[in-house]
């Protein structure tokens, strides 16, 4: 099941099972139907969001290497209109980005009103990889949690709702997925030596993720922990949250600013 992290909670990932899947099974027709219903609803709600032009949605995806960030984007965001949906994948900071504050590069990609933006990795890399590799002093790293919370509060108060998903897989599942990439030639392009090197730091990353989830799950932008060992279940959970969020945003078709009856009369001439 999806675990919503309540503000002030001290997160311990050992208490959460990455297998998940409740009473569902992969071959359950209910799963297929439920996912498709959510995707259809997301498409319809996105059209209203775009037409309304008053709200925006920022979706943040974080997780260990192979956790399924790309797969989630492919299978959950597949039905959205690309005209109003953007996907940004964050890599190592460029020299230009390093010349600014650490939130600058994320702020460049905040969605405009009426749009949805999905971040594949995000500003949270600066309290994850930066912490694990000690790229900044510990004192600065701790300051960043509060800076992130204030940044996200600013976005929410400005009309951009934020959904944050931590895709949680086990270390054994990561090994299986890396082995799959080695065994299948069509997946060799995904192989990166850094993935194998970072795997040796698994425990340190778990500590960093626990701190991130504990410090940065707020009332305005809480974290969702998604059990992600099963890809189909991961997709089901994420789609369900996104669909419910768009429904709660309740975007409305804008009222016409022109005389519809007059246009109809013109058409009938």
Image (spheres, helix red, strand yellow):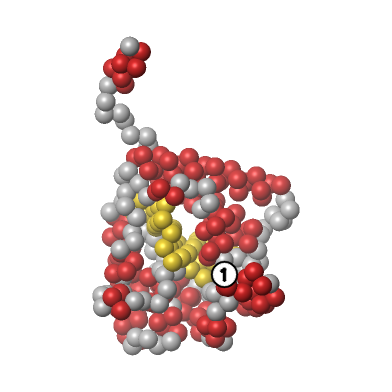
Image quarter in which the N terminus is found = bottom right
The one nearer the camera, 103 or 186, is 186
In the image, residue 176 above or below residue 241: below
The residue under the point 71% across, 56% down is 26
Q: Which residue is mark 1?
A: 67
Asked if residue 71 shows in the view, the reply is yes
The picture places residue 181, in percent across and down from the top left corner, at 64, 74
Q: Is residue 98 above or below residue 43?
A: below
Q: Quadrant of residue 141?
A: bottom left
Horizontal and vertical percent for residue 246?
Answer: 44, 46
Q: Residue at horizontal 44%, vertical 44%?
A: 46
Which of these two is toward me, 119 or 214?
A: 119
Please report the residue visible at 42 percent of the width from the left and 73 percent of the height from the top.
91
**Extreme-right residue of the structure:** 27
Which SS class for mark 1?
loop
Instruction: Between residue 90 and residue 213, name the one nearer to us.
Output: 90
**Closest to the observer, 172 or 190:** 190
Is the C terminus in the top left, top right, bottom left or bottom right quadrant?
A: top left
Q: Position of residue 213 (x, y in %)?
A: 45, 71
Is residue 44 depicted above or below 109 in this figure? above
Give left or right: position of 155 versus 83.
left
Q: Residue at x 60, y 45 (%)?
A: 36
Dividing the picture into quadrants, the one containing residue 147 is: bottom left
Q: Is residue 14 visible?
A: no
In the displayed orientation, state which residue is furthest to the top.
Answer: 269
């Amino acid at each position: 099941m999806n675990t919503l992290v309540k503000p002030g909670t001290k997160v311990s990932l050992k208490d959460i099972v990455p297998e998940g899947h409740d009473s569902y099974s992969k071959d359950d027709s209910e799963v297929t139907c439920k996912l498709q219903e959510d995707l259809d609803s997301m498409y319809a709600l996105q059209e209203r969001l775009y037409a309304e032009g008053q709200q925006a949605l920022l979706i943040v995806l974080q997780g260990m290497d192979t956790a399924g960030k790309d797969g989630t984007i492919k299978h959950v965001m597949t039905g959205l209109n690309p005209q109003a949906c953007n996907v940004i994948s964050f890599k190592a900071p460029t020299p230009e980005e390093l010349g600014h504050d650490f939130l600058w590069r994320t702020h460049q990609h905040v969605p405009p009103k009426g749009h949805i933006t999905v971040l594949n990795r995000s500003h949270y890399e600066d309290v994850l990889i930066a912490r694990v590799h000690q790229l900044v002093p510990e004192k600065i790293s701790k300051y960043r949690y509060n800076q992130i919370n204030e940044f996200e509060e600013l976005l929410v108060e400005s009309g951009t709702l934020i959904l944050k998903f931590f895709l949680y897989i086990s270390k054994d599942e990561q090994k299986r997925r890396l082995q799959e990439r080695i065994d299948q030639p069509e997946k060799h392009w995904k192989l990166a030596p850094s993935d194998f090197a970072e795997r040796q730091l698994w425990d340190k990353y778990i500590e960093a993720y626990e701190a991130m989830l504990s410090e940065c799950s707020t009332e305005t932008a809480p974290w969702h922990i998604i059990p992600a060992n099963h890809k189909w279940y991961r997709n089901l959970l994420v789609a369900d949250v996104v669909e419910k969020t768009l429904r709660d945003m309740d975007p409305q078709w804008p009222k016409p600013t022109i005389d519809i009856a007059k246009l109809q009369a013109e058409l009938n001439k």
